[in-house]
Amino acid sequence: MRLFFSFLVTLTLTSCASDPASIAKVEEHAVAMPDRFSADAAMDVLLEGGNAVDAAITAQFVLAVTLPEAGNLGGGGFMTLVMEGKPAFLDYREIAPEKATRDMYLDDKGNVKPYDSLFGARAAGVPGTVAGMWAAHKRYGTLPWQRLLQPAVTLAEKGFEVPKALADNVVWYLEKLEKRGLKGNFSKYFGHMHANEVFRQPELAETLKRIQQEGRAGFYEGETAKLIDAYMLKNDGLINKADLKNYEAAWRQPITVEWQGYDVVTSPAPSSGGVAVAQILGMFAARADDIEQLEHNSAAYVHLMAEISKRVFSDRATYMGDPDFIDVPQAALIDPKYIESRAAEVNLTAISDTDAVKPGLAESEDTTHFSIVDKWGNAVANTTTINLTFGSGVVVEGAGFLLNDEMDDFSAKPGVPNFFGAVGGEANEIQPHKRMLSSMTPTIVLKNDRVKLVTGSPGGTTIISSVAQSILASLYFNLDAEQAANAPRFHHQLLPKDTLRVHEGFDATMLQALSEMGYTLDKRRFGDIHLIKHTPAGLEAASEKSGRGKSMVVGKDKRN
Ligand code: DON
């Protein structure tokens, strides 16, 4: 029996933090990464004695080089951690620039301009990634910052062999830009990329070296800041030197909820994901026993989850936004009594009328995720994004990195859906320095204070479904990591009305039953789960097979 299971005493989340003997060692390292470059680089750091945060920092910078669709210097993200038994949450989400205004994406008639918040310099929020990694390193890092940046510098300078999926994405994106008449410099930077050939990024390498040498200041001040400022001035962008200098990542209290004997540690506002996942898991627990022999991915299960999601997304649209700007009633939204009352509204046999589902408290396609567990039992779940694939599609000239188009996650106009079909109102309207509402939900589940599951996914609003379903598949239906990451998933978000987005791979009779209930089925894949599960036999790590991820467990006696 492993050391992990030899602790019989149940410790509280806080009490185990200061007692080194209580740290739940797992004696293995595991990484579940969106590509092989980040997986190998992160595992090297762990084998060199670095901890989960060291490995996460290396992975984050490597992904900025090898996974430009989502990995980034010019974006942001969230990191959920359990270090020495103590949960923490790092918010390095982008913020609106000083010069941003509420109606900045509306035309003279008050209509939303279609691509302004999605493409070009004006779509970008002030990037948070470098400040986030710097803050994580300051608090938890053990290996030198310079060492952790080196793999990214080498991959940018010497190049890396381009995976076919990346080369295909570049071609697809160039065609899309062409078709929409969107002009920028994407082709200049990525147009010469070819599958299986070495691709070098000299400007990006120089930027990474500045960050390697100067830390946070290597991005937010000096040469890099000058290049960003100049690019913005030339291209109608809003971010200036003061925006960059003043950007701060924020340590926040993670959401921690008890669920079926586990403690789920997940993302607080400005993510809507943690509240949503807590509501889904809570409502599920309240109603699952009302269905006889509830089977994983049966029509009854999918319908129950869709009914739950209707209510979750109604609350999301109304209450969620940046807690530094608005009062997010987070505690009320995850209060067990409230969740129980919402669960009671669920109709187990028919679809609830969409218009009748109101926010309950009233009176009433790229992001990337990775998961790491080190041999000391520390865990990192990190989701990072520049919003859509290749972000705003423009590269900071001279600095070589893509900018985010995260401004689209704000509500440009009340009730008008953003790219992900999410609607919002005042809570998520644009204000200078405000963080736009996110669905990113990096999550760690603990059992008796020890890491049981680390999970997360990209996919905009579908992240919430992917994460909740990966937890249910792993811990309620007891699938192993590989099965849980690859089981077909579904998503419902209130609007469009009674529409279920479904993966391939569901049983045809089950889908038929859902159609007959009145659901419209939208067969489009979403998400890319990278999860690590702790089992009595040790760690299991899995990356969804449809992506280009790589996961591995390295222990005393295995490397797989
Ligand atoms: O923060 C959010 O919720 C979105 N900007 C995430 C975008 C995303 O996941 C796109 N990936 N497919």
Image (spheres, helix red, strand yellow):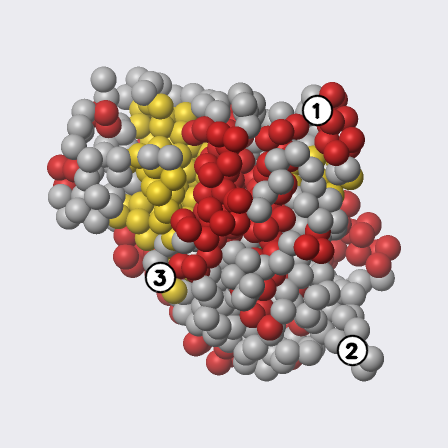
Q: Which mark is residue 251?
A: 3
Q: Nearer the viewer, mark 3 or mark 1?
A: 1
Q: Which residue is mark 1?
A: 510
| Residue 456, horizontal then vertical, whole percent | 49, 42
> Is 345 on the left or on the right of 214, as rendered?
right
| Residue 260, horizontal then vertical, whole percent | 37, 35
Splitting the image into 4 quarters, where does residue 66 fall? top right
**Image: 26 above or below 16:** above
Numbered disc 1: secondary structure: helix
The CA distance from mark 1 to mark 2 is: 44 Å
Image quadrant holding the N terminus, namely top left
Tell me if label 3 and label 1 are in contact, CB under 8 Å.
no
Which of the two residues, 202 or 269, is positioned nearer the viewer here?
A: 269
Q: Which mark is residue 110?
A: 2
Please state which amino acid type lies under the numbered disc 2: Gly
Please state which amino acid type lies under the numbered disc 1: Met
